[in-house]
Image (tube, grey):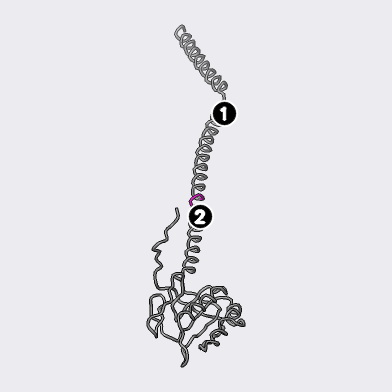
């Protein structure tokens, strides 16, 4: 009997220990802060989101910097193109003034011819060119030789006149681009160029035209004495 009671007591004691252990585990579980765990997870998520936002902000800043640089480059390219266009325009205008550009427009065509009594001389051409310039002619040619600031009209022998270094025989066809009505009035005015030529028994005819073509100057303008004033 004594052995039986001892076994019962041992079993009861073991059960008591097991029960105590189970209560301890339940208590531990009950005391576990679930909210703390959730808070920790939320904090981690917030931290991760903050990290991503920081990276996004950095990328956005770099993107803005890149776009700003691109805009600067585009502005520089645009300014370069505008400057280039301005220079091209100025160069074209300069070439027009110097006579290096073929031109067309309304104007007047005048023909001076020798006859059995009189021949055309350099003074007839010089006077006509000056009259046309004073009348606002923008371009003038004589027998397709463009008249520019350095053009010399000289006499060579009896039959030839030298223009831009080339011998030009009569008849002489003088073309001028400008206001056709004003050019016509300038040479036909009473006592003007046409009347003077007729008085001197020289042959002159003219035609007002809506379209006149004048070639470009083929020579080279050299400055022997003039230089840039710096």
Q: Depth check: 180 or 24 in front?
A: 180
User: How many tags in the picture?
Assistant: 2
Q: Position of residue 135 (x, y in %)?
A: 57, 74
Q: Depth check: 124 or 82 in front?
A: 124
| Label 2 packing within 10 angstroms: few (<14), some (14-19), many (20+) | few
Q: Position of residue 207 (x, y in %)?
A: 55, 85
| Label 1 packing within 10 angstroms: few (<14), some (14-19), many (20+) | few
Quadrant of res 3: top left
In the image, which is nearer the foreground, mark 2 or mark 1?
2
Quadrant of res 39: top right
Disc 2 from disc 1: Cα separation: 58 Å
Q: Residue at x 51, y 58 (%)?
A: 82
The numbered mark at residue 39 is 1
In the displayed structure, would residue 196 be above or below residue 47? below
Q: Position of residue 134 (x, y in %)?
A: 56, 73
Q: Depth check: 71 or 139 in front?
A: 139
Instruction: Please report whichever mark, 2 or 1, sits nearer to the chain's N-terminal start.
Output: 1
Q: 82 left or right of 162?
A: right
Question: Mark 2 — residue?
Answer: 79
**Any magenta on residue 201?**
no
| Helix, strand or loop under label 2 | helix
Query: Please, what is the dominant secondary structure of the magenta stretch?
Result: helix
Q: Specify the farthest residue to the top.
A: 2
Q: Residue at x 55, y 30 (%)?
A: 43
The numbered mark at residue 221 is none
Q: Residue at x 42, y 58 (%)?
A: 227
| Helix, strand or loop under label 1 | helix
Q: Depth check: 169 or 93 in front?
A: 169
Q: Specify the farthest residue to the bottom.
A: 116
Magenta-drawn segment = 71-77
Q: Position of residue 74 (x, y in %)?
A: 50, 53
Q: Residue at x 51, y 38 (%)?
A: 52
């Amino acid at each position: 009997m004594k052995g039986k009671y001892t076994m019962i007591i041992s079993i009861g004691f073991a059960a008591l220990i097991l029960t105590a252990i189970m209560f301890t585990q339940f208590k531990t579980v009950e005391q576990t802060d679930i909210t703390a765990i959730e808070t920790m997870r939320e904090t981690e998520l917030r931290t991760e989101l903050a990290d991503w936002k920081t990276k996004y902000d950095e990328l956005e800043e770099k993107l803005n910097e890149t776009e700003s640089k691109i805009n600067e480059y585009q502005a520089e390219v645009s300014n370069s193109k505008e400057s280039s266009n301005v220079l091209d325009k100025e160069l074209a205008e300069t070439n027009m003034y110097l006579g290096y550009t073929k031109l067309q427009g309304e104007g007047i065509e005048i023909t001076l011819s020798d006859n059995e009594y009189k021949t055309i001389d350099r003074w007839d051409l010089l006077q006509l060119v000056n009259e046309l310039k004073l009348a606002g002619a923008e371009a003038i040619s004589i027998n397709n030789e463009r008249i520019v600031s350095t053009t010399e009209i000289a006499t060579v022998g009896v039959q030839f006149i030298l223009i831009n270094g080339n011998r030009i025989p009569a008849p002489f066809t003088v073309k001028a681009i400008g206001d056709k009505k004003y050019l016509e009035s300038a040479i036909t005015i009473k006592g003007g160029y046409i009347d003077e030529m007729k008085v001197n028994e020289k042959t002159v005819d003219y035609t007002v035209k809506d379209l006149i073509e004048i070639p470009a100057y083929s020579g080279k303008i050299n400055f022997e004495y003039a230089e840039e004033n710096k």
